[in-house]
Amino acid sequence: MSALAQRIAAELAERPRHFSEVVEAHADVSWRDLLLAWGEVRRADVLERDEAGRYLVRIEDPPAQPRRLL
Amino acid sequence: MKQSFRDVLQQLREAGELRPVKKPVDPRHLSALMAQSSEATFFEQILGYPEWRAAGAVVSTRKRLALAMGCAEREIATRFEEGIRRPIEARLVDRGACQEVVVEGDDVDLTRLPLPLMHVKDGGPYISGTLVVSKDPEYGRNVGSYRMMYRTPRETGIDLVSSSDMRLYYQRAFEQRKPLPIAVAVGVHPYEMLAASYKAPIDVDEFSIAGGLHGAPVELVRCRTVDLEVPADAELVLEGELLPIGWTADEGPFGEFSHITGEVKWNPIFRVRCITHRRDPIFYVLQMPWENDWLAAPVIEAAGLQALRIASVEPVAIRAPVGSCCYWSLIASIKKRPGEGKNALLALLSVAEVKLAIVTDDDINIYDPDELDWAMTFRVQADHDVLVVSGARGKHIDPSVRAWALGQGGLPTTAKLGIDATIPEGVPREYYERLRYFAKDAVRLEDYL
């Protein structure tokens, strides 16, 4: 993953965030670069969603059930 | 000759209903800026996307929808009815502006499109104004409109949860573990969007309905990589397939047509194989919620007129208020005979998920909220003229039906309210004679200014 994609994944491991919060956290990045990095995070198959629709990356306690495809 | 998306923009420009934005705008800010304009918006420069321009909120008001439909604001339902009564078959042509630029294979990259981030809680950038074409070996071609959420440079989510013909097509393909090829046209005339939102019988081609609305055939070109056809004058086309994974990928939330954020849904994935567009393309942003709602208004108003006629009530005017998302309320004026105020209410409340209906006599201008209030004040006795029907079919998206308490798969019900604001039986009409100003026709204010 690119450095930007890794930063995004790390931020989502800290706490769940709406996509717009990810965007706000990287307001200085061009829109296209941000979407490319987001695509990398998606493809890494690490994203989960919480009930509020926020994205999160779980780094401990892997789920007992297989994750639904993201 | 049929009109295009660009023709509508020109009509709005000439009517003073299109605001040009000259400075470069980041796609992250398109929706927020559109929300601050009372006109449709045309962005002449998109930051980071030099070949693209963008337009949105094109038909976010009844006035602009009527301009696009070439009729008076009060006639959008009857104009729509005329169109669907006279379908015109689409015509296949050899080439179209939508294929002036073709991007295939490894070059396909959705991040090269100015995909907007619309709402705070959206699950990602969305393509909101789509015309999605699919085919089934038995039922033929289908055209619908489905939102698409950016996932990766070659994939989007697609909301295929609600019942629709394309959902059925996908289900049939999925059961055979086959992908469903689709083509997505963006930036087409509102007639095509209206036809797509109309629940036509499964064997009816929505392009023929759009042709009826245009009064001319919709010209279609063959797609480059899938066996489908799209409007030749579209601004942008995405070709590809819905993967045979079922409803397993997260999609949403999205700012829904109800002006409320929806939930995360589980949906299929659209894999894009080819992107085609005009040489100087305009990206269409369907601005939620009102633009989406106005595109459904003629359909629901026409359904209300139809319901009244089936009930043998003569309608004069009908209005689906945008505050009810042009979906949950219908207001109609009728030429009333005794008892028909109530008959009209029963008819209107039978339309889809309409949960509030108001009926007035034909002397009330239902487009004037003051006249409507006047009728509801002086022609309604709540113990005689208000109907409440409990336990009718509701819609999950309405928070007041408390769908969250039903558990997975639970179907909500709703109460329906009807207000008969016609002159009550037994009250002489002269009791409602309105004030008339002395010498109104004899003097003119202009002469005294």
Image: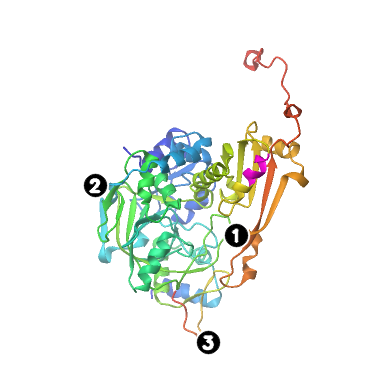
Kindly identify which chain the residue marked by label 3 belongs to.
A
Pick whichever, A31 or B192, lies toward us. B192
**Above/below status of B25 relative to B439:** below
Kindly identify which chain the residue marked by label 2 belongs to.
B
Which residue is at 53% across, 87% downward? A61
Residue B196 on image: x %, y %: 42, 51
Label ID, residue A61? 3
Residue B29 on image: x %, y %: 48, 54
Give the number of the mark in front: 2 or 3: 2
- Measure the alpha-carbon separation of dots 1 and 2: 44 Å
Residue type at tag 3: Asp
From the image, give the main secondary structure of the stretch colored magenta: helix
Kindly identify which chain the residue marked by label 1 belongs to.
B
Query: Residues in magenta?
Result: B339-345
Which residue is at 72% across, 47% downward? B386
- Give the crowd class for mark 1: few <14, some 14-19, many >=20 residues within 10 Å: some
- Horizontal side of residue B412 vs B127, given as left or right: right
The quadrant of the rendering that contains the N terminus of chain A is bottom left
